[in-house]
Amino acid sequence: MSNRKPPAGEGEGQGQPLPRWLEWAREIQALCQTGLAYAARGYDRDRYRRLAAIAAEIVAEHSHLAAAAVEENFVAHPGYATPKVDVRAAVVRDGRILLVQERTDQRWAMPGGWADVGETPSQMVVRETWEESGFEVVPRRLVGVFDANRGGRPLELFHAYKLVFLCDIVGGTARTSDETLAVDFFAFDALPPLSEQRTNQRHLDEIRAHLADPLRPAAFD
């Protein structure tokens, strides 16, 4: 048996809880980020920075990540700590769902990504789908708002929400991008290996339920 400690999220099966050390580190980081945003005295800011360093050391102790790199990531997001937002396009044609193969892990996911400031959620999902797959889409319905750290492999350091939109193709042709290696449609019962931080079985089951029931309300945690 290997003695290597898994990185954050590695080995977490679908539906399994976050490891406690990661929950502690992330909560400490969030408190530090918010504290630094409002701290008025240099002494207080120094204490929050030290707590951020401790949180980074916790992550480094249980992962392959260097403490300095984790700490740099922790302090790169100023202001009140709040979840990040990820958008995904559920595009189904002839009963098959559109997936893209991610360059980062060579696994497959619905097209999408982190939300950009200044765009509406529907604009974001249209742009991401075009950039990653080459297809022009129109969002028709919100499938659900999911906690991105539950129901699949958890994100490493930050809490995030995932918005999944059911979309129709209105143009374009399949093409890859700087972020994707391949673009294809798959039957729901014959899926390739999934990039579970981006797309997991829970999302796909909810999409199928919406396709079967047009009046189904959006899912949420």
Image (spheres, rainbow, N blue to C red):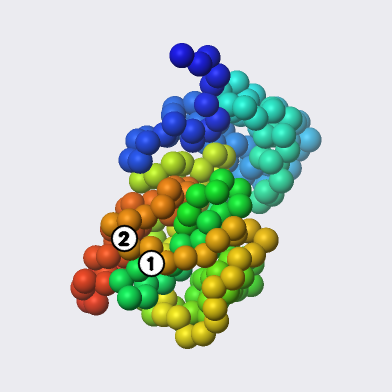
In front of the other: 171 or 196:
171
Left or right side of 25 for 36: right
Q: What residue type is labelled 1?
A: Ile
Q: Residue 85 carries which label?
A: none
Structural crowding at the residue carrying mark 1, measured as other residues with C-alpha within 10 Å and reported as few (<14), some (14–19) or many (≥20): many
Q: How many labels does the image show?
A: 2
- Residue to which mark 2 is pinned: 188
Q: Position of residue 148 (x, y in %)?
A: 44, 50
The residue located at (33%, 63%) in the rendering is: 187
Note whether 8 is above or below 194 in the view shown: above
Q: Which of 127 and 145 is in front in this view?
A: 127
Q: What element carries label 1?
A: strand
Residue 97: numbered disc: 1
Task: Establish if 196 lies above or below 169.
Answer: above
The reply to whether discs 1 and 2 touch (Cβ–Cβ < 8 Å) is yes
Residue 97 horizontal side relative to residue 25, left or right: left
Q: Residue furthest bottom?
A: 170
Amino acid type at mark 2: Phe
Which residue is painted at 50% across and 16% down in the image? 2
